[in-house]
Amino acid sequence: MTTTETTPKLLPAIEQPGLIAVPVAEPAVRGAFPTFEQVVYLALAVLAAIAHFWMLDVRALHHDETLHATYSWYIYIGNGYMHDPLLHGPFLYYLGSFLYFLFGDTDFSARLGAALFGTILTVLPFFIRREIGRTAALAASVYLLLSPTFLYVGRFFRHDIYSIVFELLVVIAIVRYASTRRALWLYVGIAAFALMYVNQETSYLFLLMMATPLVLLLLWRVFKPGILLVGALGVALALLVFVLPGEAVVDGSHTAERDPQTDEMVILAPGPIFGWGPIETEDNNYALRIRNRADNTAGNLFASMAGYIGDLWLFFRHPAILTGIGLLLGTIALSSADLAAAR
């Protein structure tokens, strides 16, 4: 339902001694029927639902889908969940197990969440039609409906469609907040990013891509020297992570050779300038040790947490990482101090 533009009807002015009477306008009257534009989007939503739900369980499960269906089923039968980056975040599996609980453990219910999100994705441009133009928003919705790629991932029991919907919701929230300044859109954006974060690791890259222009825009408006600081920080971090550390002796599977006495990686070539050794993540076994851990790896939860923190320290203790953290904190402190002084 939308508001129908009508000439405001003026109510009788309220007169009080010593005050100027000001006419009061009646609120705009809401239309009794949806607009043609709303009917079009409703039709697109119906077509999207048909396209995504029609014969949803006929095609056999893809290899990836069998993994996701299995781990969702483990939660459904009470076996719990253990994180493994190979399978990305937990959102997919908890939603899958919830749909199993509601509708039974079938191929249809396994793909049900993806189909629902694929349908929602089709009509999301509706919410920024005023900002990007009504024609552009409608064209985007039609494209999302007709695109074979989006239709495929919208019927596919994997993380892709959930991340796409959450990413677009964050973009919509940013655009709508900039346009309306309503706090509601901040909450929508935060909730969407939180769900994206627990769904898939692509959220890290998405945050980098979205935060960089927003931070630069903020600095341009309130503290222009900060742009140079951020640029210098980015260059310094890239050098610290990718250039200055050394190289380890590794085999074909990128497993590093280690000294049997010290368990340190055997250095193939020390880093330039400072002669630093390699970062711990040069060893694929280290990465596997970090990611493949159960809560009771060391016998109990607290011992496992202590071991995990100790393994993380092997990474963070490297001079390149410590220097990068110091530069990051220093840049934030310097920018904050200069900004406070400017005010």
Image: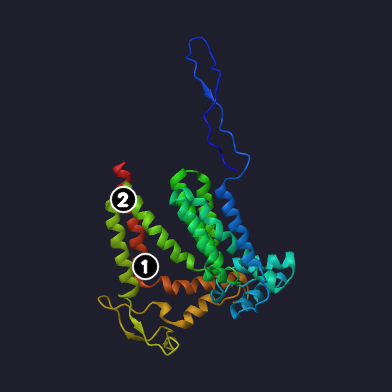
Q: Please give left or right for residue 92 compared with residue 322 in the image.
A: right
N-terminal label among 1 and 2: 2
For the rendered model, the colour scheme is rainbow
Which three-letter amino acid code belongs to the residue tagged 2?
Trp
Residue pointed to by mark 1: 322
Element marked by disc 2 = helix
Residue 94, can we see it? Answer: no
- At a point 30% along the width and 66% down the height, the residue shown is 236
Which three-letter amino acid code belongs to the residue tagged 1?
Leu
Q: Residue furthest top?
A: 17
Q: Position of residue 49 (x, y in %)?
A: 63, 62
Give the CA distance from mark 1 to mark 2: 29 Å
Q: Are marks 1 and 2 in contact (CB under 8 Å)?
A: no
Q: Position of residue 160 (x, y in %)?
A: 54, 69
Circle 1 residues within 10 Å: few <14, some 14–19, many ≥20: some
Q: Please give left or right for residue 77 compared with residue 299 in the image.
A: right
Residue 157: name its quadrant: bottom right
172 or 139: nearer the viewer: 139
Residue 123: name its quadrant: bottom right
- At a point 72% along the width and 73% down the height, the residue shown is 106
Number of marks in the rendered image: 2
Which quadrant holds the N terminus?
A: top right
Q: Residue furthest front?
A: 36
- At a point 56% along the width and 30% down the height, the residue shown is 27
Label 1 vs label 2, nearer the camera: 2
Q: Which mark is residue 220?
A: 2
- At a point 53% along the width and 68% down the height, the residue shown is 150
As displayed, is residue 177 above or below residue 54? above
